[in-house]
């Protein structure tokens, strides 16, 4: 089996594993499945959970798309008249309880071909990151320690390098703050002297396999905490910042829109209830203010 088939089979199985575990934790709602085809080539399997006992909205999607690389993306990659293949798993989970963080992750593989169908470029990308509304330091430390362990099995520099990239990438420039407490972000992972494509495949799948261990213990610990309307209001105000990042800065959203991607799958990352209050500032000395201060200067967690 070649690399792309191997990875596609992996993400199909990973989608099953993750959705089964999330349904078990939720205890009320199940994922609704939507199979779709892309007219230009390929398709995907979208799974969405809504109005659950724990998860207000979440999506765990896989896709494998191929065809002519659209002109806008040819300029972006600096190629002309190329074909492409891209597959990946993308997930975003928005829990109901404001004390449970939102989480995002994706793992993807990309190939570019010349007119004879030869691979002229190939790479992996992905990562996982945590967006709390109330900051429990031990939760951020747990998430990062699992990320670090997965990285350390492959290269001692991966965790510091990809943690910093995550902090840099998930940054709302117009707000001068991070989207959350970060995690890992890596892209254009190509064959080099130290890592061939098989080694990159092993690294990316290791990170994918670590996801549930990084996130589920946090959900289990926080999902039954008592909250009131002000906690909910703050959660929805912070979710507004999440939406801003995804619509203004996120490359994945941009790629999906430029390649005539399926709009429902691209925008499934958006939460169902959001607030934008004019010039809102948290109370001085509050937990809400503590979160905003940490988001203005990324911390070392592991």
Image: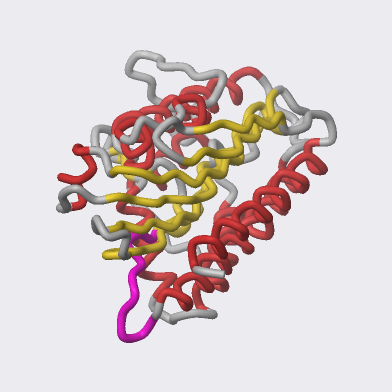
Q: Residue furthest bottom?
A: 193
Residue lying at 45% horizontally and 25% vertically, measured from the top left: 263
Report the magenta stretch's main SS: loop
- The residue range painted magenta reads 186-195
Confirm whether the magenta stretch covers residue 107. no
Viewer-nearest residue: 109 or 272: 109
Q: Residue 174: percent from the left, percent from the top?
A: 24, 33
Residue 99 x, y percent position in the rendering: 64, 37
Which quadrant: the N terminus? bottom right
Question: Which is nearer the eye, 223 or 3?
Answer: 3
How are the colours assigned in the image? secondary structure
Residue drawn at the location 47% of the way across and 23% of the way down: 237
**Residue 104's spot in the image, x, y percent?**
52, 44
Residue 99, visible in the rendered structure:
yes
Front-lying residue, 218 or 27: 27
Instruction: Name the residue at the top extreme.
Output: 278
């Amino acid at each position: 089996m070649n690399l792309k088939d191997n990875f596609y089979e992996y993400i199909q199985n990973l989608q099953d594993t993750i959705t089964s575990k999330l349904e078990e934790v939720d205890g009320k709602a199940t994922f609704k499945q939507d199979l779709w085809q892309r007219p230009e080539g390929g398709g995907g399997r979208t799974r969405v959970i809504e109005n659950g006992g724990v998860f207000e909205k979440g999506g765990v999607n896989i896709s494998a798309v191929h065809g002519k690389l659209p002109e806008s993306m040819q300029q972006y990659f600096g190629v002309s008249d190329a074909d492409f293949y891209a597959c990946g798993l993308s997930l975003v989970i928005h829990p109901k309880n404001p004390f449970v963080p939102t989480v995002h992750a994706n793992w993807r593989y990309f190939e570019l071909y010349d007119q004879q169908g030869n691979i002229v470029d190939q790479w992996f990308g992905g990562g996982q990151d945590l967006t709390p509304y109330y900051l429990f330091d031990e939760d951020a430390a747990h998430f990062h320690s699992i990320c670090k362990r997965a990285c350390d099995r492959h290269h001692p520099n991966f965790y510091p390098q990809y943690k910093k990239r995550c902090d840099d990438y998930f940054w709302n420039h117009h707000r001068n703050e991070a989207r959350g407490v970060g995690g890992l972000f890596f892209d254009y992972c190509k064959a080099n002297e130290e890592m061939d494509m098989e080694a990159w495949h092993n690294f990316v799948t290791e990170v994918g396999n670590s996801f549930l261990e990084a996130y589920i213990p946090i959900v289990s610990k926080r999902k039954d905490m008592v909250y009131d309307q002000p906690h909910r209001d703050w959660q929805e105000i912070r979710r507004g910042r999440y939406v801003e990042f995804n619509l203004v800065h996120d490359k994945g959203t941009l790629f999906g829109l430029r390649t005539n991607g399926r709009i429902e799958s691209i925008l499934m990352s958006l939460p169902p209830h959001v607030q934008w209050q004019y010039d809102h500032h948290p109370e001085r000395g509050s937990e809400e203010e503590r979160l905003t201060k940490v988001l203005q200067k990324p911390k070392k967690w592991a």
